[in-house]
């Protein structure tokens, strides 16, 4: 899998992490609002997490709205959300040397930094 850092440019947490990692001008940055997650990336991430639900940002507006409307969630619904709604992807995600670092927890960011400095 090609190295990538999936983020949302309007997410202040993502931007803070990018700055702390020192990758502001890296060619592997992928703003998911402008360049959606590819089918290949989604499949790779699914194989990592063993579920689409694990890749969902459950604090996002789209997900919250669906929850209020009492939507019935299944792996197929989660997959469709990830394919069609950039805001539903949990972020940031670093795909580096065929490893995945998912989320913004301090420990995850430390692992991201270690992988990048490899």
Image: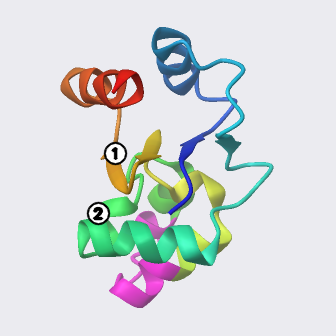
Secondary structure at numbered mark 2:
helix
User: Residue 59: where, in percent of width, then height?
Assistant: 41, 46
- Disc number for residue 44: none
Q: Give the range drawn in magenta.
A: 66-79
Which residue is at a point 70% across and 60% down the rendered structure image? 36
Q: Establish if 56 lies above or below 107.
A: below
Which residue is at a point 64% across and 64% down the rendered structure image? 85
Which residue is at a point 33% across and 43% down the rendered structure image? 101
User: Is residue 91 in view from this perspective?
Assistant: no
Which residue is at a point 35% across and 81% down the rendered structure image? 73
In the foreground, 118 or 104: 118
Protein image colouring: rainbow
In the foreground, 35 or 99: 99
User: Residue 71: where, in percent of width, then height?
Assistant: 42, 80
In this view, which residue lies farthest toward the front? Answer: 118
What residue is disc 1 on? 102
User: Residue 69: where, in percent of width, then height?
Assistant: 47, 72
| Labels 1 and 2 touching (C-beta < 8 A) | yes
In which quadrant of the rendered view does residue 45 lie?
bottom left
- Disc number for residue 54: 2
Q: Establish if 41 lies above or below 60.
A: below
């Amino acid at each position: 899998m090609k190295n990538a850092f999936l983020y949302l440019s309007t997410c202040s947490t993502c931007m803070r992490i990018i700055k702390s990692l020192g990758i502001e001008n890296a060619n592997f940055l992928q703003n998911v609002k402008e360049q959606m997650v590819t089918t290949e990336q989604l499949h790779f991430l699914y194989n990592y997490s063993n579920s689409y639900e694990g890749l969902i940002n459950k604090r996002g507006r789209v997900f919250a709205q669906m929850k209020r409307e009492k939507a019935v969630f299944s792996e197929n619904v989660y997959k469709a959300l990830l394919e069609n709604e950039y805001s539903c992807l949990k972020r940031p995600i670093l795909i580096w040397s065929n490893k995945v670092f998912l989320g913004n927890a301090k420990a995850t960011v430390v692992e991201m930094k270690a992988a990048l400095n490899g």
